[in-house]
Image: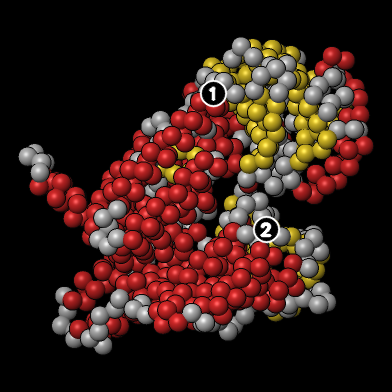
């Protein structure tokens, strides 16, 4: 077997990804199937002699066995704590962060007051105020436990599991809790303090918007970044720049190597110091899976030079993937790791091939060939990594950028240069005598940050800069493409069939896209988004969209933005704000700022309109005020009646011949006129009094799981078919013709 680590590593990782994507029951069945295949392969001499298939079958079986063992031994006992109040004691083991007016601490417990569960676990604790505590200080108190959301295959649950966190909690701050200083600190404490110091310096030296991006690029800390910036980066396909990975680690290693080579140190010492610097950078970034993967590869590469041996890239990549998931099978759910591994694999397999093709193309062009030759390396790297990461991006984000190659060519080098400037000035800023040198470097960093954000923002405005990929048609195309590429590589050497496979893949994609557009043309779609306890409703047809309500939990704002991006919406026809409650209008400012609605319809109540909302409306939209009631007709088949009285709002919506009553923020059904009490679909957040007076066939509850579970029996008793968002995804209703509708869920 030519590359044993590559075979074992990639197979092991692929099996864990499958286990993460599905569930433990399916993984058990798969484990048994592959164990049988392994035993069967031992009896066929031709397969046994080649070794690849038996090793691959056994590797899959072992990987799935390890996943199930970790699930039952570690995760299942912890999940018993779900929705329980327990007293815990442990040490703060990571840098705290703040978001949405809450403070979050990761604590490694050594005592959990609950029988039959693990005493040692990593736990994220949230609270309303910051603790007066240092890293690795002890905290003890009463907390309420709950599981992370698991609304999709790659969800917040898999994200936290990859970090070793299987339970979230919030502290009962009104009860007694204690914070105690600990004098003994582990070595890792000093790396965390160094990371903390760098973050503070960057935030001191740069404006808030620039500092948040600088910290995100250098250290992977994205908590303070504006949603609009993150959305732009995602839209144009450069969000990988915000996840510290192989690219960042390679730049740091190359910088250290260049500095050391300028000295008279022996080469062997240089390579060892570079390995040490890579380990330090891994610790500085919190040993994230993507950085650890690239760090292991670089260490193997430089150790190979130290021992005068040449490292095999595929073997090194396979070994690092295996090493990272051996003791934490849930690391396969870390999107940073998956993107890092797939991008590196693409570069290893296709970079030289693409570079050669680009150079050959440049030789046939009379004008601009020199420029193309200089850009050949960057374009080939971007193209190879983009194609390799495409399946991961499609399955995890549900979108893929069509201009990512252009965006990467324009931004990757400036971003890496900016990262070095940020690193230099933040280190120099900590040295009092050299602080004056840090100021101009901070200025150059700011210029580069502005350039990168400007490029991302401009490119994101291009129509169809990215397209949704969570339609069954796209997944079918992805599966066909993977099969075609695999067959072309297996059946013929030197990529002879790749060109034919690419052409056939494009034909399948465009036929699928056009057929989807034809079948869905003229269909009006109403979406109730899974934004927690509140109502976010979007109506769309043929590339146009309007928002009827934009409320919910503060931390769920990305759901609204992601859905409008999914529809490729750049500007809204109108935004309806029926009242100013958080359950109705908490995202209003963000929606106006990003999607520039032509009209904003809102109640004429100056006392409730905050200055920020008024300013955003005046900057980008036309305001239409109403007193108690307003009617809106559009698209020839939609009529909306918005009512607001007693600071409660009701929206009566007619699409084709179907009537929908939306009650986003509570109220009393007795206050409605009789004609509005008859509808086909009733949506509320579970707080509508006397809802039994409403006659409807369907009852949709827009709330989290705890609230929805309390109200779903009431909906059933009122003889409605109950449907709830409840953390399981958006509810989409398609209106085709007459009273024909279809209801589906989109995660």
Q: Position of residue 134 (x, y in %)?
A: 58, 71
**Quadrant in the rendering for residue 434:** bottom left
From this view, report whether residue 291 is shown above or below residue 62. Answer: above
Local secondary structure at mark 1:
loop
Cα distance in 3D space between marks 1 and 2 = 38 Å
Residue 135 appears in the rendering: no
The structure residue drawn at horizontal position 45% and vertical position 82%, both measured from the top left corner, is 45
Q: Relative to the observer, which residue lies in front, 329 or 411?
A: 329
Position of 492 with respect to 615 (left or right) is left
Q: Residue at x 26, y 88 (%)?
A: 307
Please give the label number shown on residue 521.
1
**For the residue labelled by badge 2, is the local secondary structure a helix, a strand or a loop?**
loop
Q: Where, quadrant-wise, is the C terminus in this rendering?
A: top right
Is 351 placed left or right of 118 in the picture? left
- Quadrant in the picture for the N terminus: bottom left
Task: Determine if residue 38 is in view.
Answer: yes
Q: Which residue is mark 2?
A: 148
């Amino acid at each position: 077997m030519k590359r044993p680590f590559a075979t074992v590593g990639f197979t092991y990782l692929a099996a864990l990804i499958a286990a993460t994507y599905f569930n433990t029951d399916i993984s058990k069945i798969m484990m048994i199937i592959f164990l049988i295949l392994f035993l069967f392969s031992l009896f066929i001499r031709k397969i046994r002699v080649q070794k690849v298939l038996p090793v691959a079958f056994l590797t899959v079986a072992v990987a799935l066995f390890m996943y199930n063992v970790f699930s039952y031994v570690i995760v299942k006992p912890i999940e018993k704590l779900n929705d329980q109040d327990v007293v815990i004691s442990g040490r703060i083991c990571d840098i705290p962060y703040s978001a949405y007016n809450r403070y979050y601490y990761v604590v490694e417990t050594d005592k959990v007051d609950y029988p039959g569960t693990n005493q040692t676990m990593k736990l994220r604790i949230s609270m309303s105020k910051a603790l007066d505590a240092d890293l690795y200080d002890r905290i003890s108190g009463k907390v309420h436990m709950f599981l992370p959301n698991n609304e999709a295959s790659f969800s917040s649950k898999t994200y936290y599991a990859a970090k070793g966190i299987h339970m979230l909690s919030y502290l009962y701050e009104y009860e007694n809790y204690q914070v105690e200083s600990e004098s003994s600190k582990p070595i890792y404490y000093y790396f965390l303090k160094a990371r903390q110091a760098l973050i503070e310096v960057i935030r001191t030296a740069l404006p808030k918007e620039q500092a948040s991006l600088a910290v995100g690029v250098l250290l992977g800390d994205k908590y303070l970044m504006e949603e609009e910036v993150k959305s732009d980066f995602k839209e144009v396909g450069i969000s990988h720049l915000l996840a510290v990975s192989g690219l960042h680690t390679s730049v740091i290693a190359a910088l250290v190597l260049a500095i050391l080579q300028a000295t008279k140190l022996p080469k062997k010492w240089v390579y060892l110091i570079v390995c040490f610097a890579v380990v330090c950078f891994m610790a500085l970034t919190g040993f994230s899976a993507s950085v650890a993967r690239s760090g292991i590869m670089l260490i193997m590469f430089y150790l190979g030079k130290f021992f005068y041996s040449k490292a095999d890239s595929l073997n090194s990549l396979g070994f690092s993937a295996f090493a990272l998931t051996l003791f934490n099978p849930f690391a396969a759910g870390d999107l940073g790791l998956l993107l890092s591994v797939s991008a590196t694999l693409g570069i290893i397999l296709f970079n030289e091939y693409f570079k050669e093709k680009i150079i050959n193309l440049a030789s046939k062009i009379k004008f601009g060939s020199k420029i193309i030759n200089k850009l050949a390396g960057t374009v080939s790297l971007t193209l190879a990594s983009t194609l390799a990461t495409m399946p991961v991006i499609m399955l995890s984000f549900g979108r893929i950028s069509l201009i990512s190659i252009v965006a990467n060519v324009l931004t990757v080098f400036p971003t890496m240069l900016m990262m070095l400037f940020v690193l230099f000035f933040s280190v120099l800023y900590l040295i009092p005598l050299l602080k004056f040198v840090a100021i101009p470097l901070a200025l150059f960093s700011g210029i580069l940050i502005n350039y990168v954000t400007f490029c991302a923002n401009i490119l994101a405005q291009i129509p169809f800069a990215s397209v949704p990929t969570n339609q069954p048609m796209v997944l079918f195309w992805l599966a066909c493409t993977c099969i075609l590429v695999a067959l072309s590589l297996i059946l013929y050497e030197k990529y002879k069939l790749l060109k034919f496979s690419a052409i056939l893949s494009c034909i399948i994609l465009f036929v699928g896209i056009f057929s989807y557009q034809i079948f869905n043309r003229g269909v009006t779609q109403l979406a109730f988004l899974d934004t927690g306890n509140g109502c976010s409703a979007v109506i769309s047809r043929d590339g146009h969209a309007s928002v009827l309500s934009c409320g919910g939990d503060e931390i769920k704002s990305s759901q609204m933005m992601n859905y409008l991006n999914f529809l490729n919406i750049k500007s809204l026809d109108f935004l309806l704000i029926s009242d100013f409650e958080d359950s109705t209008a908490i995202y209003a400012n963000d929606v106006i700022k990003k999607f520039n609605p032509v009209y904003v319809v809102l109640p004429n109540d100056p006392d409730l309109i905050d200055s920020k909302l008024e300013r955003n409306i005046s900057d980008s939209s036309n305001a239409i005020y109403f007193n108690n009631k307003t009617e809106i007709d559009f698209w020839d088949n939609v009529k909306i009646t918005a009512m607001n009285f007693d600071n409660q709002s009701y929206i009566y919506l007619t699409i084709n011949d179907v009537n929908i009553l939306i009650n986003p923020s509570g109220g009393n059904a007795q206050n409605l006129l009789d004609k509005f009490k008859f509808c086909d679909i009733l949506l509320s957040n579970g707080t509508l009094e006397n809802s039994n007076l409403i006659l409807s066939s369907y009852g949709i509850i827009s709330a989290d799981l705890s609230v929805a579970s309390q109200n779903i029996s009431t909906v059933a008793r009122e003889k409605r078919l109950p449907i709830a968002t409840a953390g399981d995804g958006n509810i989409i209703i398609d209106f085709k013709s007459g009273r024909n509708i279809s209801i589906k869920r989109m995660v």
